[in-house]
Amino acid sequence: MSNIQERDQTYVAATYARFPVEIVSGKGSVAVDSNGKEYIDLGSGIGVTSFGFCDDEWVAAVTAQLGQVQHASNLYYTEPCGKLAEMLCGKTGMKKVFFSNSGAEANECAVKVARKYAADTYGAERNTIVTLENSFHGRTLTTLAATGQAKFHALFQPLTPGFVHVPANDIGAMKTMVESVKPAAVMIECVQGEGGVNPLEKTYVREVAALCREHGALLIVDEVQTGNGRTGKLYSYMNFDVTPDIVTTAKGLGGGLPIGATLLGEKVKNVLGAGDHGSTFGGNPVACAGAVSILSRIDEDLLAEVRRKSRLAFGMLSGAEGIESVTGMGLMIGVKTVKPAGEVLAACRERGVLCLSAKDKVRLLPPLNIPEEQLVRALEILRDVCAEGLPKDGLLD
Ligand SMILES: *Cc1c(COP(=O)(O)O)cnc(C)c1O
C-alpha cells in the first residue's frame, strides 16, 4: 500500500470508507490518480466542482482574490461577500444572505431563523420543525435531528429536540402533522439526494407550500445538493412553482471551496440582528470570489445545456440492460441497477469512470459543463458495466 493511503489510514479519523484511489490532479471533467490513470468524473466531488476540476475562470477568480486579501474577519467589509449576496438575491428574489462554510451550517442557520421568527411572531413554544422521512440535512447534532433517517440518530443521543418527520409525498400525513404540532417551519429537499435521488411530486410540493402559508409556518428548502444549476434550474424549487421563505445552499455554489449560504425571504430578512449569529470564516473573500465566478456563469444557456444533457443521460440509461429505473432531475441522476451499486462503482472505477452511490442506487452528479462526448463515453461504460455478466433475462440468481 502506498504512503498516501497508509498515512491517511493511520492518522485520519476513520469516518470515511475511501476507495483505493489517490486523486492527484484534474482538469475539467477528468481526474488523474497517482498512477497517471485518467477517470471521467460523474461525481463532481459530491456535487461540488460545478465546472469541473481547476476550471480556468474559477482558478483566476480565486487566485486574484488570494493575492489581494484572503481573510479579514466579519469585523470588516470585503467586496466579494456583498457581491455574492447581491447576485444570490437578484437571481432568486430572496432579500438577505447569511454566509457560512457548509451545508449543515446553512441549515443550522435556517433552523435558528425559523425558531426566532416563530418565537417573535407567535411565542417561544412554537419551535417544531417538520422534515421528511428519508431526508438528509447534515451531520451536526441539529441537522442530524432534522435528517429523517433513524440510522443516523442511534449513536448520538440526545439530539436537538423539536424535530418531527413525515413520509414524503403524503400530503395527508403532512396536514395532520402541521395541524397538530403547529410547527415553526417545514423543511424539504425537492429532490432527496442522499436518500436515493428521489424528486418530490410537483403537486405535493405545491400543497406543502400552501399548507405552510395557511398555518403560518415557514417553508425552508434545502438546496445544498440540488442548488446552483444541478437540476436544470438555478434552484430546484424553481421547477415546482413555489416561493420558499428560506433557501439553504452549499456544495456546488463554491465550485470547490467551502461555503454555505442561507437565503432569507421577505418575512424573515430582518429576524437576525447584530450578535444573533455568526461565523469566523463565513463570507470568506476567497470562497466568495470563487462562488461569484460560478454563479455568474449559471445563466439560461448553461441551464438549457444541463437540461439537454439530462435528457441525453435519461435516454441512454432508461430501459438499458441491467438498469431497473432512472430517477432524478437535471444532472442529478439516480440509477437503480440489478447488480449491487458498490459493484457497479468498482467496475466503473476500474474502467476509468467515477460515480457516486446513494442508498442502493448509483448516483451521478457530473460537472454541469461536462463535454457531451465525455458524458456519452462515461455513460456507455456505465451501461456496459450494468449489463455485463447478467443472464439473458436480466436477473441475477
Ligand atoms: C450534503 C448535504 C448536506 C450537508 O452538507 P455539508 O456541507 O456536508 O455539511 C445537507 N443537506 C443536503 C441536502 C445535502 O446533500
Image (cartoon, rainbow, N blue to C red):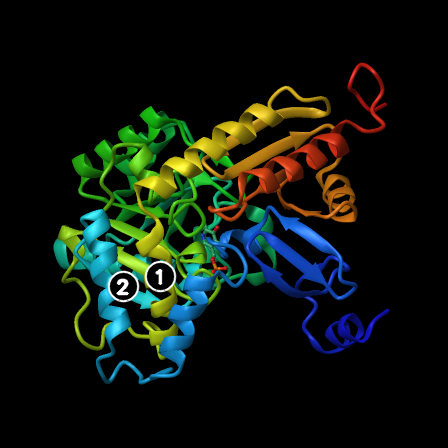
* Residue assigned mark 2: 84
Horizontal side of 7 relative to 53 (left or right) equals right
Q: Is residue 2 above or below residue 107?
A: below
Q: Is residue 297 above or below residue 397?
A: below
The quarter of the rendered structure image containing the N terminus is bottom right
Residue drawn at point x = 65 percent, y = 45 percent? 355
Residue drawn at point x = 26 percent, y = 51 percent? 246
Query: Residue 44's x, y, as percent?
Result: 55, 53
Give whichever of 379, 332 is nearer the camera. 379
Query: Residue 360's x, y, as percent?
Result: 66, 37
Query: Residue 331's x, y, as percent?
Result: 49, 39
Answer with the quarter of the image where residue 281 lies: bottom left
Give whichever of 26, 284 is nearer the camera. 26
Answer with the quarter of the image where residue 53 lies: bottom right
Q: What residue type is disc 1 on? A: Ser
* Residue assigned mark 1: 293
